[in-house]
Image: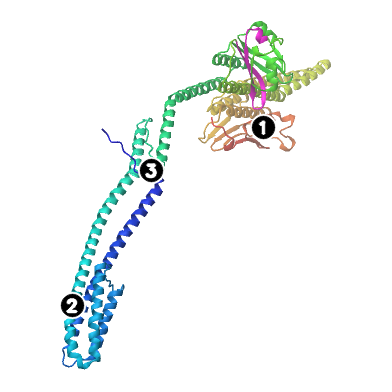
């Protein structure tokens, strides 16, 4: 049968109080024992001195007796010996702590000392005094002294014996005390070890064992609480911690499952949001994007129907763009809703997400969604930044409550749809701008070529009519010749424009396209063109190459029309910066009288506009020896192909 451990006493007191109390008790006990042994040692040393002095009394008394029998006695010496005897007796009676010297205080020793002192003072000392004062009686007095001396010596011997006996008793007591001190020290050490084990070691071991059990996931472990000291408080706190951990661990599986479910829902929401984003980022028409968006939204939320409306900001109307799960009558009536009308218009006007349960709305209020058989509706806005572009709705036959995550997702997808709609609009505007710019360039090209040619033909026809009226055959022939030349030049201009607009380039095809354009120019004008390519820089994108080719074609067209050149040189330098130059040896023109904005030189204006679109710098130099058109595209304006 296991013996239950009983805690040492004092466990209801603080550990510090107990340790200090035990230390003080040990200190007091040790000091007491040391002081007792010191006192016994001092008493033994004093008793030994008393034995020596008592023995000296015996020697001194015998020496006095021997001196009395001397033929010639020195009275002064006798007097000194008597004083020495008196002083020794006084010292034995009083004791001397400095020597130390102490007469034992037992009654038998004190009685024997009194007898010895009385024997001296009443018997021997009077004889010696008479010996000093009565010289004639000295022989008799010496004999009397010797007769009494035997009793005095016997008394002194008895006193010495009694002191030695008392000293032996004290020595036994000292040894016994030392043995007792050793025993008590051993017992005290055992008691201190016992107390420390009960107060410190055992509680620490219990806590350590509890920690080991807790490490092994045994949260049912309990440490015994055996007092109200520090370790008792630790044990109580440990038990509370174990109980809380047990409760937490028991609930951990459920919490993990709950967190796992939440993470799965969040991952599903993120995946859905990513699907919406990736789908809406694909190219396609606006209505097609909205239809796919609505289909995905209905599938995710399990809705029974839905609609997407686009806002017309000029008239504040919401136009039904795509729909699902609603009747034709609903589509016809909801085709255009004014912002502020019905639930959808009200939500769009307020710019917020709303959830409505038709069962909680007034029955007298007419809602077309409720007439369609839906019991709840969710409405969110299509936004892009702070701008509202429209709204989208989901219809539910069974009322649906949205969680916080569902509401955030339902609201967030509208922002992605808003970005997609805005991107579609920006793309359309970009296309319109590009078309407008190309139309402007076409108009300028037509004005510079065909329009001027037609104006020239108009003048020649008028001159031809005048010549016919005047019947001047020579002028008629010359006018016909001029009209034929003008028609041929206009035809060449039209063909050149058509060829320019049909040009398409891929990255790296610029040199080949320049060679093709040069060959065509040579066939039309019989003017040779040389092409020189320098450098191994990275190729330009196809769009930039196409604009460069248009600039070269425009420069060649100007050379054909105005330069009267005999040779043309094209130099392409592709290094860190890109540079292209077209140089002819024609008649040139006066730059001071012709600016880039002049209607007489629309070709130069067209070239400048194309260079501006590239981010390049265009320079024209002309004199009587020819014209050089130089285009420079700096490295910080280049775009990687």
Which residue is at the front of the view, 280 or 476?
Answer: 280
The mark that comes first in sequence, 2 or 1, is: 2
Circle on res. 151: 2
For label 1, the residue is 608
Q: Is residue 230 above or below residue 66?
A: above
In percent of width and height, residue 134 lies at 23, 92
The mark that comes first in sequence, 3 or 2, is: 3
For label 3, the residue is 11
Q: Disc 2 and disc 1: Cα gap in Å?
A: 160 Å
Kindly indicate the quadrant of the structure image that contains residue 62.
Answer: bottom left
Kindly indicate the quadrant of the structure image that contains residue 397.
Answer: top right
Residue 9 relative to residue 430: left or right: left
Residue 88 relative to residue 318: left or right: left
Q: Disc 1 and disc 3: Cα gap in Å?
A: 102 Å
Residue 399 belongs to magenta span: no
Q: Which residues are magenta?
A: 368-396
């Amino acid at each position: 049968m296991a013996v239950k451990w009983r805690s040492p006493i004092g466990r209801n007191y603080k550990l510090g109080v107990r340790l200090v109390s035990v230390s003080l008790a040990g200190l007091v006990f040790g000091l007491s024992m040391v002081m007792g042994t010191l006192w016994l040692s001092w008493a033994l040393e004093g008793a030994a001195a008393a034995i020596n002095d008592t023995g000296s009394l015996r020697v001194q008394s015998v020496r006095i007796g021997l001196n009395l029998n001397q033929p010639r006695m020195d009275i002064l010496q006798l007097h000194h010996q008597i004083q020495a005897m008196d002083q020794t007796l006084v010292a034995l009676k009083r004791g001397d702590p400095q020597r130390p010297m102490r007469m034992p205080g037992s009654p038998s020793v004190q009685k024997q000392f009194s007898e010895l002192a009385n024997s001296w003072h009443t018997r021997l000392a009077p004889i010696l005094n008479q010996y000093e004062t009565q010289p004639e009686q000295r022989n008799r007095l010496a004999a009397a002294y010797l007769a009494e001396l035997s009793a005095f010596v016997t008394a002194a011997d008895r006193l010495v014996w009694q002191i030695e006996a008392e000293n032996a008793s004290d020595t036994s007591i000292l040894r016994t005390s030392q043995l007792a001190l050793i025993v008590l020290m051993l017992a005290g050490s055992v008691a201190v070890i016992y107390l420390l084990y009960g107060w410190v070691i055992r509680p620490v071991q219990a806590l350590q064992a509890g920690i080991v059990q807790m490490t092994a996931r045994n949260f049912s472990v309990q440490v015994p609480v055996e007092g109200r000291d520090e370790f008792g408080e630790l044990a109580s706190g440990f038990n509370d911690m174990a109980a809380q951990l047990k409760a937490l661990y028991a609930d951990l599986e459920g919490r993990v499952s709950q967190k796992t479910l939440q993470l799965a829902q969040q991952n599903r929401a993120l995946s859905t949001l990513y699907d919406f984003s990736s789908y809406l980022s694909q190219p396609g028409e606006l209505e097609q994007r909205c239809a796919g968006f609505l289909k995905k939204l209905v599938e995710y939320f399990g809705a029974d129907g839905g609609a997407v409306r686009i806002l017309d900001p000029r008239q504040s109307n919401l136009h039904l763009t795509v729909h699902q799960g609603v009747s034709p009558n609903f589509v016809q009536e909801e085709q255009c809703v004014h912002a502020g009308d019905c639930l959808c218009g009200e939500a769009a006007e307020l710019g917020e997400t709303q959830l409505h349960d038709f069962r909680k709305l007034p029955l007298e209020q007419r809602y077309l969604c409720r007439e369609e058989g839906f019991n709840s509706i969710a409405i969110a806005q299509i936004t892009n930044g702070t701008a509202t572009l429209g709204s989208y709705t989901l219809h539910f036959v069974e009322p649906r409550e949205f969680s916080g995550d569902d509401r955030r997702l339902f609201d967030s997808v509208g922002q992605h749809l808003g970005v997609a709609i805005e991107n579609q609009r920006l793309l359309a505007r970009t296309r319109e701008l590009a078309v407008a710019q190309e139309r402007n360039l076409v108009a300028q090209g037509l004005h510079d070529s065909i329009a001027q040619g037609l104006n020239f033909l108009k003048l020649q026809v008028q001159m031809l009519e005048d010549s016919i009226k005047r019947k001047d055959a020579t002028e008629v022939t010359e006018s016909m010749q001029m009209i034929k030349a003008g028609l041929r030049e206009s035809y060449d201009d039209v063909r050149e424009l058509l060829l320019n607009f049909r040009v398409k380039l891929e990255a790296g095809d610029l040199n080949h396209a320049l060679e093709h354009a040069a060959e065509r120019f040579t066939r039309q004008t019989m003017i040779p063109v040389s092409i020189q390519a320098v450098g191994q820089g990275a190729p330009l994108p196809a769009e930039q190459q196409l604009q460069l080719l248009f600039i070269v074609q425009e420069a060649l067209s100007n050379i054909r029309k105005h330069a009267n050149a005999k040779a043309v040189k094209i130099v392409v330098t592709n290094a860190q910066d890109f540079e292209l130059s077209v140089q002819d040896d024609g008649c040139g023109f006066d730059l001071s009288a012709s600016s880039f904005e002049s209607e007489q030189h629309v070709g130069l204006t067209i070239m400048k506009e194309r260079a501006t679109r590239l981010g390049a710098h265009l320079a024209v130099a002309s004199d009587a020896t020819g014209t050089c058109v130089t285009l420079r595209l700096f490295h910080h304006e280049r775009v990687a192909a």
